[in-house]
Image (cartoon, rainbow, N blue to C red):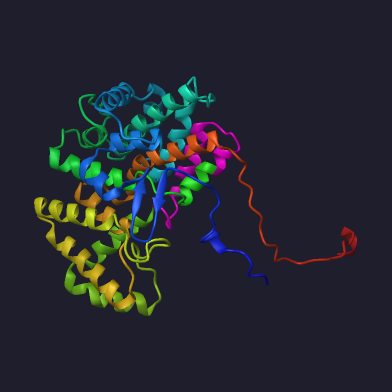
Amino acid sequence: MSTDHHAGLEDIEVLESSICEITQERLAFRGYNIVDLAAESSFEEVAYLLWNDALPSRLELDEMTKALRSEYKLPREIIEHTNHVPREAHPMAVLRTLVSSLGLYDAEAADTSGPALRRKEIRLLAKTPLIVAAIQRHRQANSYIEPNTDLGIAANFLYCVGGAIPDSETAHVLDTALILYAEHELNASTFAARITAATQAETYSCTVSAISTLQGNLHGGANQRALEMLLAIAKPENVDEFLDRALGKKQLVMGFGHRVYKNGDPRVPILRKHCETLAQKKNQLTIFKTAVKLEETMLKRKRLHANIDYYSGLAFYLLGFSADLFTCIFAVARMAGYLAHIEEQYTQNKLIRPRGVYNGKRNLKYLAIDKR
């Protein structure tokens, strides 16, 4: 069998992009190190950077913030649709469906010209958190909460889920997590969005492709499974026993290893620190210490570093979200990156059509059906 191909397209460079740079030690958006963006920026500012290839001035950021908050509303039909989906349905399946439906109520859905595209980017970034919040409220048999236009995306999302304006520290933790997840080059779901955009499909279809891909356990679903694993371990002293059992059965330990970051995910130290702060605030230090112990032990025994999914699951748990909502929050953040890539694909488009390596039967003789 031929081995002249790369399974999973590993190490294959399929296109040029100016949006995101990843090395083994560094992650940068449009040239800006993620460490600096997480420390100094806001999610809205990072979205502006991803879409415009430059950080905004104060006036530009104010204008974008105003535009986003003007879209803090969902069509009545989307809210009604949310209230009629099965409560037991997975939130990602509902999100996929509702984002697709959202396009039905956008008169500019099919228009991929520059000004219309930017207006749709604003709508999708503003409305996706509202959809996720509505899904969560419905699942808990609670009524929809109208958004607060005085709040940024992170704080408003927490408000629409919980019904109370969050304190600034809590909102900052979520805002930082959104920044860290906002973009990550040609991951599976972003690549799916670009493949769809390359066919010149409209923006909503491209984002639905991305969300559908993100739902997979080996992509966006990893943080949910990592958190469930930590809850099962329960306390630091159980880590070694858990690993002995898991590694003995050759089970995958979720939240460890990365195809690119062989020396550690640069986003992890940022989120780990925020998890420690939240754990202290919520009196949940046991689960944080369990996470640190497992991280240290996996590095020692398997030379595998934790990735962002490992600590994002813990962060979202400490913020009060149920585990099966984690991937939806990932989608809220990554929407900024998806839209940047969709726009870039539209502007430098070439249909994405790779070849496969055939490994099936050859030269079979066709027999008429009555001779088979």
Closer to us: 129 or 297: 297
Q: 346 left or right of 336?
A: right
- Residue appearing at x 35%, y 68% in the figure: 253
Closer to us: 92 or 35: 35
Quadrant of the rendered image containing residue 360: bottom right
Q: 366 left or right of 249?
A: right
- Residue appearing at x 19%, y 41% in the figure: 172
Position of residue 42 relative to residue 185, above or below, is: above
Position of residue 261 relative to residue 16, above or below, is: below
Q: Is residue 46 visible?
A: yes
Position of residue 8 relative to residue 80, above or below, is: below
Q: Where, quadrant-wise, is the N terminus in this rendering? A: bottom right
Return the x and y of residue 367 as percentages of the image width and height. 88, 62
Q: In the rendered structure, does residue 211 fall within the stretch colored magenta?
A: yes
- Predominant SS along the magenta part: helix
Quadrant of the rendered image containing residue 174: top left
Return the x and y of residue 150 as percentages of the image width and height. 20, 25
Position of residue 282 relative to residue 49, above or below, is: below
Return the x and y of residue 301 as percentages of the image width and height. 30, 78
Which range is magenta?
Answer: 195-220
Q: 172 left or right of 355?
A: left
Return the x and y of residue 147 as percentages of the image width and height. 26, 27
Q: Where, quadrant-wise, is the C terminus in this rendering? A: bottom right
Closer to us: 325 or 197: 197
Q: Is residue 89 visible?
A: no
- Numbered label tally: 0
- Residue appearing at x 36%, y 30% in the figure: 127
Quadrant of the rendered image containing residue 53: top left
Q: In the rendered structure, does residue 347 fall within the stretch colored magenta?
A: no
